[in-house]
Amino acid sequence: MIAAAVPPVSAIADVLRLWGIDGWLTPPLAPVVAADAPMIGQVMTVSILSGSAGPGLAPLYSILSSELSGRFVVIAGGTNVDGAVWGEIMATAAAANHAGGVLVDGLVRDLPTMAAIGLPTYASASCVVGPNGTAHAVEVDGTISIGGVGIHPLDSVAADATGCVRIPHAHLDEVLEASLRYAAAEDRVVHALAAGEPLTSAYLHKKTVVDELRR
């Protein structure tokens, strides 16, 4: 979902930190195809393992063959695979079934064609070679971890041009509301500076909101 009501990822990350909650996924994930505007979607998690035998990526292909309705496909474990676990073909399938975006804790490839497809994509890094049958999707819609951040099946991901962050399901509404207030306060600081106000006083617009949000 892309909407004016989705705050910047940096505001969400700062609110989570103020409240002692983790969630920022950049780093380790960086934009490969960045979202044009802040967006949010519920996750669809996939765990991948490297091995000489297993189910391959058939369970992931099954997900990408079904309606995704704005959900973020979040793939964990791909950093252990020697090759790209996401590329043009998967991005085409995900976009055709209305995925909101994809997060890959691992390598991706086909960056020019993925940019043309336009599906927001965040990944650890890129390479040119595929996994050659050594990547296996071993669990779908389970609890995963990326960079030490736990991601549960009901959680949501917010993404924009700067990166991505996980929002716990239990805190979704209050985090979004607080992050919108936080972002608005930052905007007031910038506008005050543009009007000639010194930072020492302009920053008070943000400090007031930060003090109110501290728990």
Image (cartoon, rainbow, N blue to C red):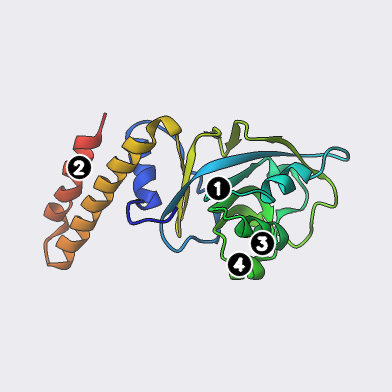
Q: Camera-side residue: 128 or 151? A: 151
Say what amino acid the circle numbered 1 marks.
Phe
Of pointers 3 and 1, the one earlier in the residue sequence: 1
Rendered image: mark on residue 64 = none
Q: Using the rendered view, name the quadrant where residue 178 is placed.
A: top left
Q: Residue sitting at 49 percent across and 36 percent down?
A: 155
* Residue 207 visible from this viewpoint: yes
Rendered image: mark on residue 92 = 3
Q: Of helix, strand and loop, which one carries label 3?
A: helix
Q: Camera-side residue: 167 or 80? A: 167
Marks 3 and 2 in Cβ contact (< 8 Å): no
Indicate which label's residue lies in the foreground, 1 or 2: 1
Label 3 vs label 1: CA separation? 14 Å
Which residue, given by chain and number where applicable, does mark 4 sit on? Answer: 117
Q: Is residue 120 left or right of residue 59?
A: left
Q: Camera-side residue: 208 or 64? A: 64
Say what amino acid the circle numbered 4 marks.
Ile
Q: Residue sitting at 65 percent across and 59 percent down?
A: 91
